């Protein structure tokens, strides 16, 4: 016999309160049952003698940054991607899990519990308000849901939207935030791709992406004209796949030149200064064969039989130049992976105050 379920105190969690508003929001959360682990409130910095130093010796901290990503069966690469971006100054991650079946949940839930990231299950059927009739798949609605979370929480200055095969590399600075200091008047920055090939690997090699794939296309390769965006949370209005669909201000490249929205994230120039995105699109041939059958997260029509054309591997398997700048972060990546693995091992599986998207 069905029994009435009692409402637990605080059952709806911080997300219920987060989206509470007197007016109907322009965009509302998805009506689906995603698991969400709450973010601990930011802690105050420890006291420092820096406040007693002369003003000319004081340096403002870099702006804070959160990355948003939608993932599908990326478990072998998740820890490296997270560890690397933590090493270059990313403060938090909002990750939407698009029906993964490879154990992604069991990696991300402990890290969400530890406060490293925020995790949602994101199904292809989700109809996010404002995007029902758009010619888009789950990626753009997921990005905008992540933006809404970041905007409501107001913990971060910037939000970036990238995939799990993309690694944002500061070419001259220690962190991404150090670079973003110089773009405080822009609504968003567009960071060009640097396309990496298979480096001759037929089978999936052991070890890390960043150490195994070290050969890339020449700068003039046309795909390098693509950019991905990092936007100021306060100026973003609607996220897109490559650049914002709407923002209060211009999107500029790393040279400060405006990126036209007319070409949907394909820039007239390729700028590999200050920041660049190492895009490990193909990886090995074995990994490509797995990737090509995963579907297209940006497509409105979810066709289970859709596959990337096999000819695409040959077109993007470009290895003309050896490029190893990212390897300067290799020791930090390894330490970071060890830390993340320790968090996972320490996770007890206990009940948490997680909220379902249906509670919103």
Image (cartoon, rainbow, N blue to C red):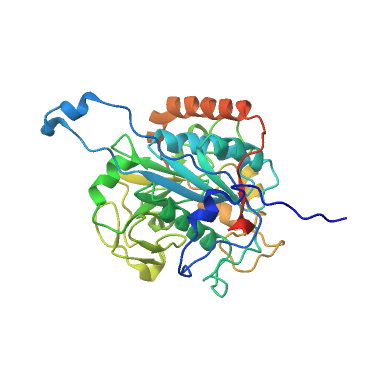
Up the image or down, 196 lies above or below 248; here it is above
Up the image or down, 9 lies above or below 244; here it is above
Q: Nearer the viewer, residue 111 or 208?
A: 111
Image x and y of residue 155, in percent: 39, 46
Image x and y of residue 175, in percent: 33, 37
Q: Identify which residue is drawn at 61% across, 49% down.
A: 355
Q: Identify which residue is drawn at 31% across, 51% down.
A: 271
Q: Nearer the viewer, residue 345 or 260?
A: 345
Which residue in the rendered view is the most extreme toward the bottom? 133
Q: Identify which residue is drawn at 52% across, 26% down.
A: 339
Is residue 53 visible from the viewing direction of this image?
yes
Is residue 281 visible from the viewing direction of this image?
no
Image x and y of residue 163, in percent: 51, 50
Left or right, 106 with respect to 143, comes to right
Q: State which quadrant residue 232 falls in.
A: bottom left
Image x and y of residue 29, in percent: 55, 61
The number of numbered discs placed on residues in the rendered structure image is 0
Q: Nearer the viewer, residue 269 or 51?
A: 51
Up the image or down, 25 lies above or below 196; here it is below
> Quadrant where the N terminus lies?
bottom right
> Quadrant where the C terminus lies?
bottom right
Q: State which quadrant residue 187 falls in.
A: bottom left
Q: State which quadrant residue 328 falls in.
A: top left
């Amino acid at each position: 016999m069905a029994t009435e379920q009692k409402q637990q105190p605080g059952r709806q969690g911080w997300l219920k309160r987060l989206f509470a508003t007197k007016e109907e929001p322009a965009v509302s959360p998805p009506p689906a049952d995603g698991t969400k682990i709450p973010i601990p409130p930011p802690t105050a910095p420890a006291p420092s003698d820096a406040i007693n130093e002369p003003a000319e010796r004081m340096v403002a901290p870099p702006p804070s940054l959160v990355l948003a990503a939608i993932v599908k069966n990326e478990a072998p690469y998740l820890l490296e991607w997270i560890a690397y971006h933590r090493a270059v100054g990313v403060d938090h991650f909002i990750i939407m899990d698009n029906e993964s079946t490879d154990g992604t949940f069991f990696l991300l839930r402990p890290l969400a519990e530890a406060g490293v990231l925020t995790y949602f299950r994101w199904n292809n059927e989700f109809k996010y308000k404002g995007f029902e009739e758009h010619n888009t798949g789950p990626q753009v609605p997921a990005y905008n849901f992540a933006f809404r979370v970041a905007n409501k929480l107001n913990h971060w200055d910037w939000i970036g939207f990238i995939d799990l095969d993309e690694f944002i590399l500061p070419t001259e600075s220690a962190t991404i935030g150090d670079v973003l200091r110089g773009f405080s008047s822009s609504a968003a920055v567009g960071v060009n791709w640097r396309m990496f090939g298979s480096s001759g690997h037929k089978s999936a090699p052991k070890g890390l992406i960043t150490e195994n794939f070290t050969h890339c296309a020449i700068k003039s390769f046309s795909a390098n004209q693509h950019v991905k965006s990092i936007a100021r949370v306060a100026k973003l209005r609607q996220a897109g796949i490559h650049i914002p669909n709407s923002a209060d201000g211009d999107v500029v490249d790393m040279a400060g030149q405006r990126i036209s929205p007319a070409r949907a994230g394909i820039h007239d120039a390729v700028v590999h200064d200050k920041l660049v995105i190492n895009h490990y699109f193909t990886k090995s041939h074995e990994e490509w064969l797995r990737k090509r059958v995963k579907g297209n997260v940006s497509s409105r029509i979810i066709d289970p039989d859709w596959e990337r054309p096999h000819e695409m591997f040959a077109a993007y398997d470009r290895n003309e130049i050896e490029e190893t700048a990212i390897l300067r972060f290799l020791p930090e990546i390894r330490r970071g992976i060890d830390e993340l693995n320790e968090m996972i091992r320490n996770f007890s599986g206990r009940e948490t105050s997680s909220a379902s998207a249906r509670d919103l």
